[in-house]
Image (cartoon, grey):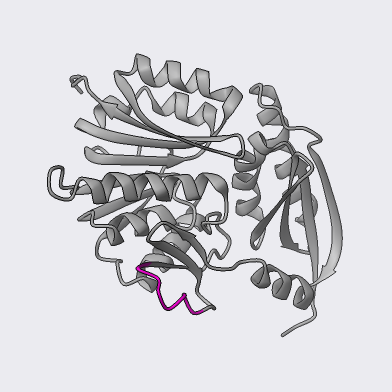
Amino acid sequence: MSASRWAEITVSVAPQAADAVAEAMRAVCGGVTETTGNGRVILTGYSPTDDRVGARADAVRARVAAARDLGIDVGEGTVTVRPVVAQAWEQAWRESFQPVRVGPITVTPSWLEPPRDAEVIVTIDPGMAFGTGLHTTTRGCLAALESQLRAGESTRPTKTVIDVGTGSGVLAIAAVKLGAERAVAIDCDPTAASVARENAALNGVADRVRIVVGDLMNAVAQRAEVIVANIHAHAITELANVLPHHLQPGGRFIGSGVVEKQYPAVESALGAAGLTEVETLREDDWVTAVWEMRECRAS
């Protein structure tokens, strides 16, 4: 392995800004890791040391500033850049990912063997995308998917799941492995879409997971029994406006990436769109909620 020079880009943010900033980092960094402690989240990514490294760091700073402008508490919001040796960070990056178990689901990195007693295995190589199953919000979405798909096997068969902001594809892949006939995985970042496509093939479900590059729900016209979005509060409030046009009557929306103090605004937006809350999961100040489309609106 080459000992070429890379730049380590590190951002210190409040937990509620972590997802939004990580989304920007995954577009410019070769892998993003997350460390939580003392009420803050440290996001770390890596970029080649070339004439664009400054622009990459500025893009991350711009996302921090945009989150602050939206009223999101970003905390410190400090972005730092320092040189590192590729061999050192790549090894540390791989060692930071271990298999994660959520109920019957085990998310495991592609370079590790899953536990022998794992029931539903989702193998992920995050590449330059975000979504390893490690984050609280991802675990919440996996738990909610398992609850919705397995509980409804006999009474509410799920033909289609739409995963908005798919990242590495972990939720879309889990959905079909939990029994959905097919999944549509949407991401505005072509790099993330490419990683999700590779992960679908890695899991043997490429024929059941369709990858679409697009912004929120503008990329597809179909309806689904389940829509899952592990994004952030502001994006979910925007998404609420189009959910009635994409959810089947009685369909379920799983939303996460929302901290507790932002949840009232999300509740208001989803309620106004004709959805009713049916289940809420809370962990470490993060909220994952399941909503049902009770009102059928004309598209």
> Which picture quadrant has residue 172?
bottom left
Residue ID at (66%, 50%): 25
- In the depicted structure, whether residue 152 falls above or below residue 132: above
Q: Residue at x 38, y 21 (%)?
A: 270
Q: Position of residue 101 (x, y in %)?
A: 48, 61
Q: Is residue 167 left or right of residue 78?
A: left
The location of residue 52, given as percent across then percent down, is: 75, 56
Residue 297 visible from this viewpoint:
yes
**Magenta-colored stretch includes residue 67:** no
In percent of width and height, residue 296 lies at 18, 21
Residue 169, position as x, y percentages in the image: 43, 57
What range is drawn magenta here? Answer: 113-120
* Viewer-proximal residue among 245 and 257: 257
Quarter of the C terminus within the rendering:
top left
Relative height, residue 215 to residue 241 (above, below): below
Q: Residue furthest bottom?
A: 1
Given the current orientation, which residue lies at the most extreme right position?
82
State which quarter of the image contains the N terminus.
Answer: bottom right
Give the number of callouts: 0
Q: Residue drawn at (27%, 25%), measured in percent from left and top?
A: 244
What residue do we see at 76% from left, 78% from top? 87
Question: Is residue 226 placed above or below 124 in the rendered structure?
Answer: above
> Is residue 217 among what the camera can see?
no
Q: Is residue 48 above or below residue 54?
A: below
